[in-house]
Amino acid sequence: EYDNADKSYNLLSAEKNAGLLAEESMYRRGELFYTRGKFSESVNLFESYIKKYYKGHFYYGAVYFAADSLVQENNLTKAILYYQQIADTTDNTTYKYGSLKKLVELHKFLKEYKVALSYAKLLLNEYGQQAKDDGIDVYEKELVALSEGADSRVLKLETEYAKEGSEKT
């Protein structure tokens, strides 16, 4: 089933007179491999789309899912560059919030706490309640402490203690 879809998308994406259908087919091929967990292939396909259809209809989706695939492939540096590209755009894209959130997570993972903190603050300023609902305000407090040299293990225990309700534990 997936193989037939891939063949169809491949044929359509190569068709010179297919216009938007060719563009969408090229994007859908990357999506197809992404959903199957074939991240190396999906990166290649999304990057082909990005090069061929700069600022096309699915451009930011291709950049976002290329980045996410790169994270799965443990290529964090390149993934950060892609997420950063979306975060920096002035274009209206639904992928901006998710990219900023991923940048917080990745920079925290890399122990780049001040950078992660700057993205957490940006999320809270630009997205308010949505960011709070996602726990970015808790991340912000944690990142402030980590950037000031707090021990991450102690901080994790304190956060768990606070989540459980200090009177219950």
Image (tube, rainbow, N blue to C red):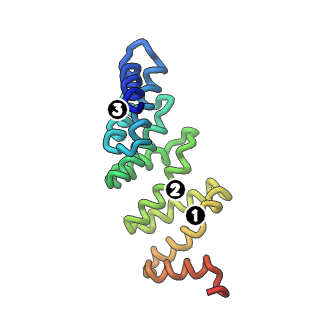
- Label 3 sits on residue: 48
Q: Amino acid at mark 2?
A: Lys
- Label 2 sits on residue: 101
Q: Which sits earlier in the primary sequence, circle 2 or circle 3? A: 3
Q: Amino acid at mark 1?
A: Ile
Q: CB of mark 1 within 8 Å of CB of mark 2?
A: yes
- Label 1 sits on residue: 136
Q: For marks 2 and 3, give the CA distance.
A: 25 Å
The image shows residue 23 at horizontal and vertical percentages of 44, 24
Q: Quadrant of residue 48?
A: top left
Mark 3: give few (<14), some (14-19) or many (20+) Cα within 10 Å: some
Q: Secondary structure at mark 1?
A: helix
Q: For marks 1 and 2, give the CA distance.
A: 8 Å
Front in this rendered view, residue 32 or 54: 32
Front in this rendered view, residue 168 or 107: 168
Q: Secondary structure at mark 3?
A: helix
Q: Looking at the image, which residue is at 39% across and 45% down?
A: 37
